[in-house]
Image: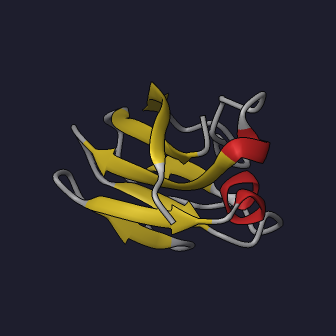
Amino acid sequence: MIASHVAREQITIDNTVGGKTLTVTNITGRVRYVEIQVLTAQIRVTHDGSTAPVAATTGNLWNPGDIKRVWGPGNLQNLKFIRESTTNATIVVDYWGER
C-alpha cells in the first residue's frame, strides 16, 4: 500500500480532564495511520478509548522528540492525551492514507 499525506494538525495538550483527542475527524475514513511528533513537553497517552490518561500515573509516557505511528481509524479515535507536568505540550499529527 502506498499512502499519501492527507492532512496535518498541531494540537496543544493541556490538563483537560479525561484527556484531549485528535481533532481532524472528517477525514478518518481515508486515513490509514498517523505519525505524531511530541514537540515541547512530556505527555501521557492511552489507547483504549475508555481509560483517561492521568499525569504521573496512567498511560504511556511520550517525550519531546518522540515520533510515534498509530495505525487504523478505530485506534486513532481511541487515543487520549494529557500533559505530564504543569507545562502544556504541543504535538504535530500527520495523517496518511488515501487522497
**Residue 3 relative to residue 66: left or right:** right
Q: Residue at x 31, y 35 (%)?
A: 87
Q: Residue at x 66, y 29 (%)?
A: 24
**Residue 39 relative to residue 97: left or right:** left
**Residue 45 relative to residue 85: left or right:** right
Q: Residue at x 30, y 53 (%)?
A: 42
Residue 40 sits in quarter: top left
Residue 56 coordinates in the image, percent (x, y): 44, 67
Name the residue nearer the viewer: 68 or 38.
68
As drawn, which residue projects farthest toward the right? 50
**Residue 44 relative to residue 71: left or right:** left
Residue 34 coordinates in the image, percent (x, y): 49, 52
Residue 78 coordinates in the image, percent (x, y): 74, 59
Name the residue nearer the viewer: 44 or 71.
71
Residue 2 coordinates in the image, percent (x, y): 46, 58
Count of numbered circles in the view: 0
Q: How is the image coloured?
A: secondary structure
Name the residue nearer the viewer: 26 or 57.
26
Placement of the C terminus among the 4 image quadrants: top right
